[in-house]
Image (tube, rainbow, N blue to C red):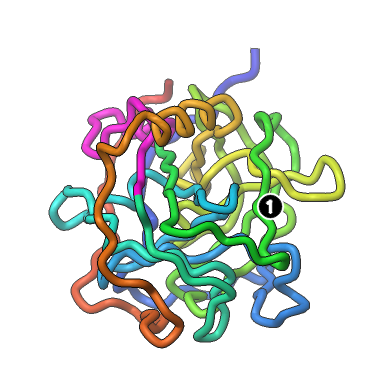
C-alpha cells in the first residue's frame, strides 16, 4: 500500500492580509490582459470588508465557490457579515468584469473554524456564496465542478495572492502528490490570498474544478498546498444553500465600479497563521 505523505506543519489560512512581499514564482503566468484572462473570467476576488481577500470562482450564474475559512475574521473568529462581502469577477488592474454583493453564504456541514484537528478542517473547508444578482455576461462562463483527481494527475490553479492582488496568476502544471481523508496534497504555488482558489483539471475542452485551496503545509520537508476534495461534497453545499433563508442578510447598498475597493494591503489585517503539528491520518 502506498505510504501517505507525512503532513507535519504550519497549516496557514491563506486569505490575504498585511504581509511581507514574496518572490514571484517563475511557473506563474499573470493574467493581466484581456487575451490572457480569456476563459478564466469566472475567477475573481472575494473581498472581505476591509480585512483582506480570498480567491473565488463562479460555478453558476448566482453561486461562487471558495474556502469556508474565508468567511471568518481570523482576529475574532467570527463570521463576516455577508453584506460586507463583495465578489469581483475577473478583477484586473483596478477593474472587474462584474461586481456583486452577497445575499447568503454557507459552509460545508461539518466544517468548524476552530477545529482541533487541522487536517479535518481542511477536508471540510468549502463554502458556497450566493450573489445578490446572477452574472449572465457571455464572457463570464461559470466553471463546472468535476469528480475527484487521482494521485499523480496534473492539475492547475488560478489565484490571487498578496504579491499578485491586482490580477490573478495561472499555474498550468502542478500535481496531486497524495490524497488523505478528503483532502488533496499538491505541489502548487500558493500564497496569502490564494485561499478559495480553484484547482482545476483538463479532461476535455474546458477546465473543471476538483478542489479548492485551503492552506499551506510541509510534507516530507517540502512546501505543499492543501485543498478540499469537492466532487463528492458539492451536493451537500447546494443542499445547505437551499435549506432556507436562515443565512439571509438584507442588502442595503449595491457595489459599483466606483465603490469597489482598490487592490491594496489592508491596514490591520492579519493572515492569522497558526503553527500546528498534526499527526498523519
Is residue 170 at all visible to an observer of this figure? no
Pick out the residue farthest to the right: 205
Residue 256 % position (x, y): 42, 79
Range covered by the magenta-colored residues: 104-124
Residue in the image at 79% along x and 46% along y: 202
Q: Is residue 127 magenta?
A: no
Q: Name the residue under label 1.
A: 156
Q: Is residue 119 magenta?
A: yes
- Location of the N terminus (image quadrant): top right
Residue 171 % position (x, y): 67, 60
Residue 214 % position (x, y): 44, 46
Q: How many marks?
A: 1
Pick out the residue farthest to the top: 1
Q: In this view, does 114 lie to the left or right of 153?
A: left
Q: In this view, does 135 lie above or below 211?
A: below
Pick out the residue farthest to the left: 76
Residue 160 % position (x, y): 51, 67
Which of the two residues, 181 or 9, is positioned nearer the viewer here? 181
Q: In this view, does 247 lie above or below 82?
A: above
Q: Report which quarter residue 102 is drawn in.
A: bottom left
Residue in the image at 55% along x and 38% along y: 185
Which of the two residues, 275 or 140, is positioned nearer the viewer here? 140
Residue in the image at 70% along x and 44% along y: 208
Q: Is residue 245 above or below residue 2?
A: below
Residue in the image at 35% along x and 33% along y: 121
Is residue 209 at all visible to an observer of this figure? yes
Which of the two residues, 198 or 129, is positioned nearer the viewer here? 129
Binning the other alpha carbons within 10 Å of mark 1 as few (below 14), some (14 to 19) or many (20 upward) gives: many
**Secondary structure of the residue carrying numbered label 1:** strand
Q: Report which quarter residue 4 is drawn in.
A: top right
Amino acid at each position: 500500500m502506498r505510504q501517505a505523505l507525512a503532513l507535519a506543519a504550519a497549516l496557514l489560512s491563506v486569505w490575504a492580509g498585511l504581509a511581507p512581499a514574496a518572490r514571484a514564482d517563475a511557473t506563474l503566468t499573470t493574467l493581466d490582459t484581456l487575451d490572457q484572462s480569456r476563459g478564466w473570467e469566472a475567477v475573481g476576488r472575494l473581498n472581505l470588508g476591509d480585512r483582506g481577500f480570498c480567491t473565488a470562482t463562479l460555478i453558476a450564474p448566482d453561486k461562487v465557490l471558495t474556502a469556508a475559512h474565508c468567511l471568518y475574521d481570523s482576529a475574532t473568529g467570527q463570521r463576516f457579515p455577508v453584506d460586507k462581502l463583495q465578489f469581483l469577477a475577473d478583477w484586473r488592474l483596478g477593474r472587474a468584469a462584474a461586481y456583486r454583493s452577497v445575499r447568503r453564504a454557507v459552509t460545508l456541514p461539518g466544517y468548524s473554524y476552530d477545529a482541533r484537528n487541522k487536517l479535518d478542517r481542511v477536508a471540510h473547508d468549502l463554502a458556497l456564496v450566493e450573489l445578490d444578482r446572477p452574472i449572465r455576461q457571455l464572457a463570464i462562463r461559470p466553471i463546472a465542478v468535476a469528480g475527484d483527481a487521482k494521485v499523480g494527475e496534473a492539475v492547475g490553479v488560478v489565484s490571487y495572492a498578496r504579491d499578485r492582488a491586482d490580477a490573478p496568476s495561472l499555474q498550468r502544471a502542478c500535481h496531486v502528490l497524495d490524497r488523505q481523508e478528503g483532502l488533496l496534497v499538491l505541489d502548487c504555488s500558493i500564497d496569502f490570498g490564494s485561499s478559495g482558489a480553484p484547482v482545476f483539471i483538463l479532461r476535455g475542452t474546458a477546465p473543471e474544478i476538483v478542489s479548492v485551496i485551503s492552506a499551506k503545509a510541509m510534507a516530507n520537508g517540502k512546501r505543499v498546498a492543501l485543498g478540499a476534495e469537492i466532487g463528492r461534497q458539492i451536493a451537500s453545499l447546494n443542499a445547505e444553500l437551499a435549506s432556507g433563508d436562515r443565512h439571509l442578510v438584507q442588502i442595503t447598498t449595491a457595489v459599483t465600479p466606483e465603490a469597489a475597493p482598490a487592490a491594496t494591503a489592508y491596514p490591520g489585517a492579519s493572515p492569522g497563521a497558526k503553527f500546528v503539528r498534526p499527526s498523519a491520518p
